[in-house]
Amino acid sequence: MQEIKDMVCPFCGCLCDDVTLEIDGDRIVSTDNCCTIGNAKFLGKHRLKNPIKKVNGKWVDITYDEAVDTAVDILLDADRPLLFGWSGTHGEAQCVGVHMNEILGGVIDSTTSVCHGPSILAIQEVGHPGCTLGQVKNRADLIIYWGCNPIEAHPRHMSRYTTYADGYFLDNAFRNRKVIVVDVRETETANVADEFIRIKPGGDYAVLSSLRAIIRGKGDMIPDSVAGVSRTQLMQVAEMCRTCSFGALFFGVGLTMAKGKYKNIRNAIELVDDLNRHTKFTLTPMRGHWNVYGANEVFSWMTGYPFAVDFCRGVAFYNPGETSAVDVLARKECDACMVIASDPGAHFPRACVEQMRDIPLIVIDPFQSLTTPLADLQIPAAVTGIDAEGTAYRMDGIPIKVKKAMDSDYPSDTEILTRIYDRMLEVKGL
Amino acid sequence: MKTLLIKNAFVIDPVQKISGEMMDIAVRDGKIVDDVKNPDQVIDAEGMLTLPGGIDSHTHICGTKVNFGRYMSPEDMRAGRTSRKGDMHATSGYSVPTTYGNSYRYSRMGYTTLLEGAMAPMEARHTHEEFRYTPMQDCLANTLFDGNWFALEAIQDKDIKRLAGILAWYLSAAKGFGVKLTNPGGTEAWGFGQDISCIHKPIPRFGITPREIIVRMIEANEMLNLPHSVHLHCNNLGKPGNYMCTLDTYNAIPDLNDKRQSLYSTHVQFHSYGGTSWNDFCSKADDIARSVNDKPQIVIDTGQVMFGKTTTMTADGPMEFNLYRLYHNKWSNHDVEMETGSGVIPVHYRKKNLVNAIMWSIGLELALLVDNPWQCILATDNPNGAPFVKYPEVMALLMSKEYREKEFATLHKSTGRRVALPAIDRELTWDEIAVMTRSAQARALGIIDYGKGHLAEGAEADIAIYPIHVDTTDPAHDYERIINGFSTTEYTIKRGEVVCRRGTCTLEGNHSTYWVKPHVSPAYDMSTDTAFIDGFNKYYSMRIGNYPVGDEYIGRNVCIETEASI
């Protein structure tokens, strides 16, 4: 039995790096410091043993060499391929993906376009006053969770970085901090908050605007109730925000995907901007996949755009809503697709799933997922954080090396993609 | 054994005191040698101006805030797109290009070594990841210490040796090159939304002054025998009247190293402002230049502003917020726990804006009023003052009074009353330009001994051949030829291989990362210091074991090991 400390959890955007694993032979038998979701990932079973290919409607086992050749054929035959996913793999693999897409002239997109894409659109309009999570841990005396439920989706967020975390400038962090939760339903997180603002679905924009009006001294314009929130409560919350020493607003897809979408986020950023005229306030998106932020970073330094990048003109072109995965699929524009490290079959709209079913589809993933039945080829990879290593970016932009706990025969995503890319260059004579 | 012979080169190499000699340059295995027999490749330079490869000792090309500049600015990305061609990957961006964009464009201008000006050690991994995709230049990264709590506590305790030990640990962990201070104390104050004024008042919560931080850091830097000096972005950037603060700072700087400066003062244009508000804003470049002329321990870079759109990015978080409140475009801020902060905002410098016109003049005045070109480096603090592609225009402005006057006539009409530029007749020579764009950088960074910035035997064969014939080009009048000539080399040679020919990069490139590893005695080795380790694990949001950047992030690796005197 072997114990490894300070491992990095490859589940959510928290990227907790204090996990202890106990290993027996080639198996992780227990975890310590992990949340239940991370624990389930580390102890996950049922990995695909080898690449599989659909022949006459039936899955047959093939070798990695055959799998690479098949993938190259599919992608090079396509006029408008889509390379989608990337949020559950390491940065080095994402870099190969971008190079590959440059050769293919296809669209490369990550799960961002269906989670925090609107946050990025808002940031591109008005910017992003943010900070690292340790800054919140050490300084913040006011935390706001808006449209997110960390207790269930990011289970260690509150204990590592916010509510329950010891901080340099807080003697008694738990008692010295105030937590405000804004949501349309009373979540587990709302139950532990000092203040819960329950808004009517679709009311986020109005509530944000009201808070901004109060902060700017126009509180007398606010009606008795805004989207189900009383004026008294809005005044009280605005005062809490204005008078704290360091406030941190975290928001999730409950805000990005609610009515108003990126305009909600823009309003939230501008609220934080207003508050910075009175105190210190920051804002951080609660990123879901462990390296979805990394995909944004890699795509930015290699193509100039954080997601939904279209190379069909030879240059990088970006127009979310046109070049994002859902749109390319729903318009039935895309004629081949490679899905890596994500499960769009479980999350995409029906029209997109139908299109994935109807075109050649390659899946690179260690596990079978709801995308597998739609695919023509699945190539199993090593799991970063278990039997592969690589770079990931935490939700606050901190790059962390995700380590491996053991060796295996599975190739990593980088190895698989590099083989496909090299073969593509060979076939194209480049 | 790959060999190259460059024939008939018109060489200016200030380090070797070569001032315009027709020479042949021989290269073997990436190094300059005395001679080669039967060379594998011969280049006839046809008397063209041949210089050591350009070095930018202060630029922002890779790392978290640079990438955030890209992330938040699709409009900038659309402004500079190229498709894949030969060995060149697709690029995007004008003021904050993609890594390949930066690399190819610098290579086109003959630049072979770049120093990323500000890297938060906690985010160093990111900078090194981007370096990997900047293939045509050797890269170095200055490491931010301005708000480092461990360092501030050591200064509080007046324990300079411990301070040096802390710098050593972080530099090795981040694989950084030099010590960078940005608005020392001010970025820590910004952690709670405050700033500080100049260098004499104690900073909040730590009770030490910025002056103490600067001077103690310089002392600790020298204890570690680092190749480069402390690299300082002074306090009060961009505020009218800040020249007094800059002079105060310069007066505090000790002279501790006879091989190079003790202080590299960066983007001094932004720190040479007179007046009490934007209403009576004026140039004080004269006072600053006089101070630099008196102090051999100080080297400055100009931080030249050029007109047009760009993106500002700095670890000076409070300054960026102030700038945002002037511009009202968009504002990004990113404070890094226990270390530093940063901000990014786009700006547009306009000729008809009086303040911008004065800023443009101040940069040129500094370059023309500092007597010794070895003490004044030409830089725009890319992209803060302007994108680096403007360098050839800056060179032409410095070499031609006629061009300056022509440009000056297009500025806000009140500019002349606030600046001294029209009264300055100096026109810089070819030699002075060569010093200010490569040799002075190499000396200031302390990398001459590592074969950078010159063409002596044994040097790295980083060479730029410009399509300029010095004997038939009068820079005072032929400024268009200066701009065109310096914009695109005939050949850029990196480590003995042609990497760029008339603007087309011909190789994938394989750069090196230079970083320093100071060796300290066990008493000051922070990796075994319990107080340091405990404090680290308690207050950082990352475990200390996961913090250092591993060797796998660096391809060709040049580790400069130093013996510290502690």
Image (cartoon, grey):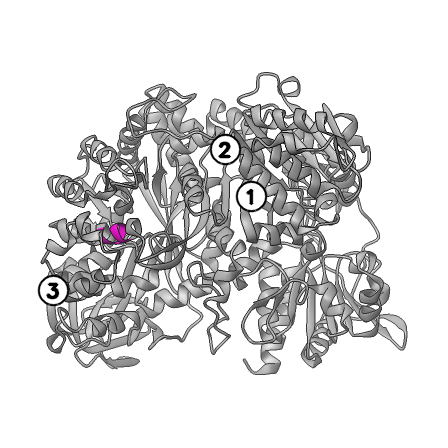
Magenta region includes residue B358: yes
Classify residue A42 as left or right of residue B98: right
Inter-mark Cα distance, 2 to 1: 27 Å
- Circle 3 SS class: strand
Magenta-colored segment: predominant secondary structure:
helix
Look at the picture and state if B199 lies above or below A46.
Answer: above
Residue indicated by mark 1: A398
Inter-mark Cα distance, 3 to 1: 47 Å
Q: Which numbered disc, 3 or 2, marks the residue closer to the eye?
A: 2
Disc 1 residue type (three-letter): Ile
Residue indicated by mark 3: B18
- Residue B235: x and y in percent read 32, 35
- The image shows a total of numbered marks equal to 3
Quadrant for residue B557, please give it: bottom left
Q: Earlier in the sequence, mark 2 or mark 1?
A: 2
Q: Residues within 10 Å of mark 1 (few under 14, many from 20)?
A: many
- Disc 3, disc 1: CB below 8 Å? no
Disc 3 residue type (three-letter): Ile
| Chain of the residue under label 3 | B
Q: Which mark is residue B504?
A: none
| Chain of the residue under label 1 | A
- Please identify the quadrant where the N terminus of chain A is shown: top right
- Residue B352: x and y in percent read 31, 57
Q: Which residues are magenta?
A: B357-361
Inter-mark Cα distance, 3 to 2: 56 Å
Residue indicated by mark 2: A277
Disc 2 residue type (three-letter): Arg
Relative to the observer, which residue lies in front, A4 or A198?
A198
